[in-house]
Image: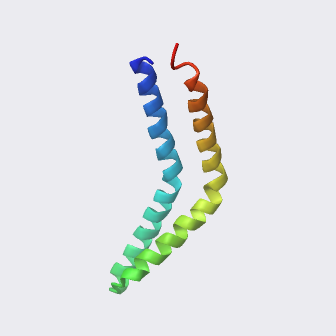
Amino acid sequence: MTPEAVIHIGRKAVETVLLTSAPMLLAAMVIGLLISIFQAATQINEQTMTFVPKIVAVFVTLLIFGPWIIELLVTFTTGIIGQIATIGQ
């Protein structure tokens, strides 16, 4: 296996991780920002007020983007499995 092939596989793996995690991270970030603004405006500093909405937002985002994430992971996995045959050559 050439160094270029290893770099390509690593690059695709990092790209896949970023793409699959981005929707949940963005949802948590937006909800966290909105709750922080609300807490700053009302001076309410309750820890569960930040945690629970973020978890709910992440789960809802996972339900919405789940099929796309699974398709992306299956595509990546089948590509890696397909490349196993060419490793010894």
Residue at image coords 42%, 17%: 2
Residue 78: percent from the left, percent from the top? 62, 34
The quarter holding residue 71 reads top right
Residue 67 as seen in the image, left or right of residue 40: right
In this orientation, which residue lies closer to the viewer: 22 or 77?
Answer: 77
Residue 83 found in image quarter: top right
Q: Position of residue 15 (x, y in %)?
A: 48, 39
Task: Say which of 54 and 83 sits in front.
Answer: 83
Quadrant of res 59: bottom right
Residue at x 46% of width, y 22% of height: 5
Q: Residue furthest front?
A: 88
Q: Position of residue 85 (x, y in %)?
A: 58, 21
Eyeballing the image, is 44 above or below 2? below
| Tally of numbered tags | 0
Q: Which residue is located at x 61 percent, y 27 percent?
A: 82
Image position of 9 with respect to 28: above or below: above
Could you tell me which quadrant the N terminus lies in?
top left
Tell me how the rendering is colored.
Answer: rainbow
Which residue is the extreme one toward the top? 89
Q: Residue at x 47, y 45 (%)?
A: 18
